[in-house]
Amino acid sequence: MNRLLHLGYGCYAWLALLIIVAPMCVVLAVTPGVMRRRRVARAAARLFLLSIGSPVRVDGNTIEPHYPCVVVANHGSYLDGIILTAALPAGFTYLIKYEMSRVPIAGFILRRLGSAFVDRRDRNDRQRTARALHSLATRGSALGFFPEGTFDKAPGLKPFHLGAFAAAARAKLPVVPVVIHGARWKLPSGGLLSRPGPLRVHICDPVHAPADEPTARALMAATRRAMLVHLDEPDLAPDPAYMPE
């Protein structure tokens, strides 16, 4: 019976996504202005999560008083991008792994929303992306990152990449840690069918680089500590100060 319920719910979720995404793509194709398109995507993300019985509950701090800022979130599910789009203000530019730009429909949507893509395997591309993000940050853009870069089925907070924290440190912007709850259970890595279940986003207090060590790595370590307080998953970094380039 549980398998039948899972199958039925998962198929319904795919149908709801198709019904909402198809007209959204048309609207994004003809709507001028990135901010207008981001508002459309935010409304569509909220409608989708509501339609599958999992509207996002947001608690903790608020983003607006710290805007512009750099938001970093844990990454545990294919749903994380939709969840952040629904939960956060529409003005964020998200850093997305380059492979997503080649995914049909998803790549189109992400490009129309002004997302920044990075190929982490290409050092030159990482450096170009870092310069672009620094430029966006210094111009007052709000940036959103999944600093783990990837996710899998096993729970835990993986080591962070440095880009988000370098952009924040150089532009002297606060980092706002965001903790997503329920997404890994609802649609884990390798899963095709979503499960029913609640979704919650906790917005932590903003984190600033320590005055005695205002570096990107120190900012990363402080942000990681703040996230782990609210994340009910283990710390998978071998050293809190470790982070891949």
Image: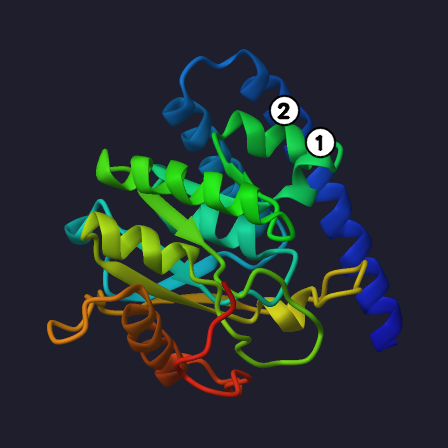
Disc 1 + disc 2, Cβ < 8 Å: yes
| Frontmost residue, 24 versus 138 | 138
Q: Residue at x 50, y 86 (%)?
A: 235
Residue 32, above or below 201: above
Q: Nearer the viewer, mark 1 or mark 2?
A: 1
Tell me the number on the disc at residue 87: none
**Residue 226 in view (yes/no):** yes
Q: Residues within 10 Å of mark 2 (few under 14, many from 20)?
A: some
The x and y percentages for residue 170 are 24, 51
Distance CA(mark 1)–CA(mark 2): 8 Å
Tell me the number on the disc at residue 105: 1
Q: Is 194 situated left or right of 33 in this image?
A: right
**Kind of residue at disc 2:** Cys
Residue 199, above or below 231: above
The x and y percentages for residue 213 are 18, 73
Q: Residue at x 65, y 73 (%)?
A: 185
Q: Residue at x 52, y 87 (%)?
A: 238
Q: How is the image coloured?
A: rainbow
Splitting the image into 4 quarters, where does residue 39 fall? top left
| SS of the residue under disc 1 | loop
**Residue 50 in view (yes/no):** no
Residue 65, above or below 59: above
| Frontmost residue, 204 versus 223 | 223
The x and y percentages for residue 203 are 32, 65
For disc 2, the marked residue is 25
Q: Is 67 situated left or right of 223 in this image?
A: left
Q: Residues within 10 Å of mark 1 (few under 14, many from 20)?
A: some
**Kind of residue at disc 1:** Ile
Q: Residue at x 56, y 71 (%)?
A: 182
